[in-house]
Amino acid sequence: MIDTLKQWTDRLLGRGDAAITVPVFDGALKSNRLIEDAAVVAELDCPQDLATDGVSLWVADGARVLRVDGAGRRTVEHTFERPVSAVASVLGGGLAVALGGQEVRVVDGPHDGRRFDAAGGQRLNAVNALASTVRGRLLATDGSLTQPPEHWKHDLMALGRSGRLIEFDLGDGAAHVRAAGLGFAFGVCAPADDAAWVCESWRHRVVQVGGAQAGRAVVDDLPGYPSRIAPAAGGGWWLTCFTLRTQLVEFVLREPAYRKRMIQEIDPRYWIAPALSSGETYLEPMQGAHLKTMGVVKPWAPPRSYGLVIRLDAQGLIRYSLHSRFDGKHHGIVAAAECDGWLYLLSKGRRRLLRLSVAAAEASLGGS
């Protein structure tokens, strides 16, 4: 009864979950052009994810996993029968890949051939991120039980809350669900033996599962939709946000009648919804004078797509951020991997593998 009354008053007053306010870029989140100016290492067909063991870099591109060297030379390491939706280096050797979001398979290394297709009595549906733990187990985020990985927009517009965190035992083949009911789980890391940090895209936060502080929001009320999280050299993490929140989208999410008609009557490419890229067609919902005046981008223009990576310290505090702004092209950053002093970024919106020097980026930001 109390929860129902709170929800009603929140909707009446426009506060709490009913608020459409969006955090602004300030302080450690102040915008810059570091992602936009990053070097292009490779043009890709259908980029999905990155992985590294500290020496080699692997790129999931469609149904292939490529090995990419510092000069951008690509070698096909593996080819599968379905698109690779996630990839991770396995502790002790080998790669873990998610195929079509519905199967996790280990190739090479001591666990070569190990497969998983279900957990907690339900089949895998939208596995979009993988991470190894120090105990040699494998963590996976299953974004949604109702939508495949490529239909993330549909899950957002349906206010999806069916994401799961799953742990696989590579030794005995067991799989169990560590958390359920997540708002599109998309990204996971293991900062400690008994704890995991999970990105909840639709709740705009990173939340801890397990450990002494289970349930705490590591990072909350982000200005974007968080996706994968990867370790940074020397401690801390790289958190990617595949696009930004806007007041317009927040408003649409609180209008059920409008959302239902939009889903039924309009092509998903033209929904009032976040996107991985923009500015390519006059059919987009926001264009023209909404965004520019006499050829100049308005400083308050709502970004339909964006490129954002956030550097977190070991406790989850934001140190600084890297951007490709509204008027840039390197949008839809879905994965990051630090290797040999370089930060590699996957721009799914532009279908490019990018690279920038971590030391140079920190120097340009004033030694952050």
Image (tube, grey):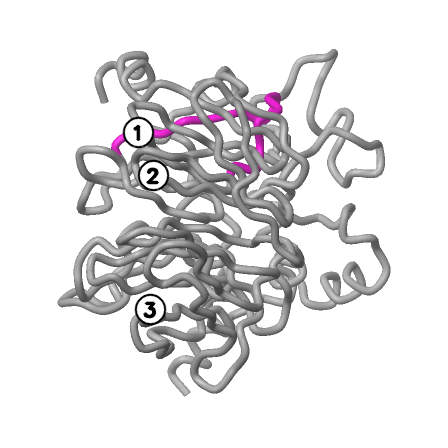
Q: Which residue is mark 1?
A: 320
Above or below 258: residue 76: above
Q: Nearer the viewer, mark 2 or mark 3?
A: 3
Q: Which residue is mark 3?
A: 170
Q: Give the mark, 1 or 2, whose residue is nearer the N terminus.
A: 2
Magenta includes 263? no
Residue under the image location 37 percent in, 52 percent down: 94
Q: As shown in the figure, which amino acid type bears the numbered disc 3? A: Leu
Where's the C terminus, which quadrant?
top left
Quadrant of the rendered image containing residue 214: bottom left
User: Is residue 100 among what the camera can see?
Assistant: yes
Where in the figure is residue 147, as x and y percent of width and height? 64, 67
Residue under the image location 43 percent in, 83 percent down: 120
Magenta includes 325? yes
- Is label 3 in a helix, a strand or a loop? loop
Residue 270 or 65: which is nearer the viewer? 65
Residue range in magenta is: 319-333
Q: Give the mark, 1 or 3, whose residue is nearer the N terminus.
A: 3
Query: Residue 238 has which mark?
Result: 2
Where in the figure is residue 348, as x and y percent of width and height? 60, 38
